[in-house]
Image: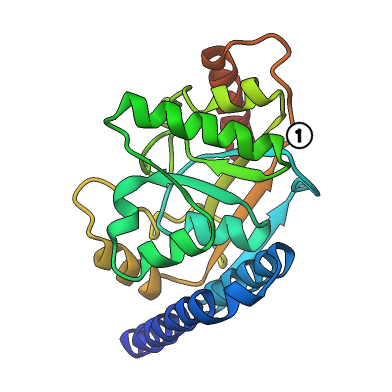
Amino acid sequence: MKRIKACWKLGRAVLHILGGLLTILWRFPRLSQEQKEIRIQVWSLEMLACLGIKLVVTGQPARTGPMLLVANHISWLDITSLHAARYCRFVSKADVRQWPVIGALAAGVGTLFIERESRRDAMRVVNHMADSLRNGDVLAVFPEGTTSDGVSLLPFHANLFQAAISANVPVQPVAMQFIDRASGQRSLAPCYINDDTLMGSIWRTLTAPALCAVVTFGEPQSAQGRDRRTWAADVRNSIAAMRA
């Protein structure tokens, strides 16, 4: 029965993804930016529902930009969960653009892509981020650079904090967690690390007991004279405290 339910949820999710792609290709060209943002948030909420995951939001997400959201990274579900809580533009590794279907979805919702190995491209993205922030956007980054084990936090890379410093805009810490609904304990089912395959992680999530995606928004903070490394370390400590 558990496998049948998992297959049912997977089928619904695949159809929902294809529907999202069609929306981007055919409807988005005729929508305003505000209408696109609403559609993306609604689509993300519906995707979590397809997967049987309940969204829990604590704290107050930024009502308007400019704002740089800084979150820990656990799973392939993080982007959908954060989009469901508050629309934002993500900064992502460039190879995501090449993923079938997912790459088109990511590009369609306004993702900024970065080549991790290229210092020149990283600086281009930082400058692009700063321009977007000056224009009032809400951007989101995962400064760990990759997914963690869901229990501890990896060191935060500080480069992307430079965009907030250059644009003189605040950063809002965001703590991501996945919780077993029945026990209230942290669930590691959605983790995507080490030797995990994407399909393996997805299947483990679909067959796990009912989950909550918990997105906790902390208090926005300005640089207040901190350099990017000090600020990154302080935000990491804030997120660790919010997850404790």
What residue appears at the point 48 percent right and 77 percent down from the top-left corner? 25
Give the secondary structure at mark 1. loop
Residue furthest out toward the front: 30
Determine which quarter of the picture holds residue 238: top right
Q: Which residue is mark 1?
A: 219
Q: Amino acid at mark 1?
A: Glu
**Which quadrant: the C terminus?**
top right
x and y, in percent, of residue 1 in the image: 35, 90
What residue appears at the point 62 percent right and 41 percent down from the top-left corner? 174
In the rendered image of this protein, does residue 176 appear above or below residue 5? above
Which of the two residues, 130 or 52, is positioned nearer the viewer here? Answer: 130
x and y, in percent, of residue 226 in the image: 64, 10
x and y, in percent, of residue 14 in the image: 39, 81
Colour mode? rainbow
In the rendered image of this protein, does residue 37 appear above or below residue 241? below
In the rendered image of this protein, does residue 168 appear above or below residue 35? above
What residue appears at the point 63 percent right and 21 percent down from the top-left corner? 166
Which of the two residues, 214 or 71, is positioned nearer the viewer here? Answer: 71
Q: Quick check: 242 left or right of 143?
A: right
Examine the rendering and report whether any part of residue 210 can be seen. yes
Badge 1: few (under 14), some or many (20 or more) residues near its Cα, within 10 Å? Answer: some
- How many callouts does the rendering have? 1
Determine which quarter of the picture holds residue 179: bottom right
Determine which quarter of the picture holds residue 99: bottom left
Examine the rendering and report whether any part of residue 183 can be seen. no
Which of the two residues, 209 or 96, is positioned nearer the viewer here? Answer: 96
What residue appears at the point 70 percent right and 56 percent down from the top-left corner? 57
In the rendered image of this protein, does residue 32 appear above or below residue 158? below
x and y, in percent, of residue 205 in the image: 38, 67
Q: Quick check: 65 left or right of 96?
A: right
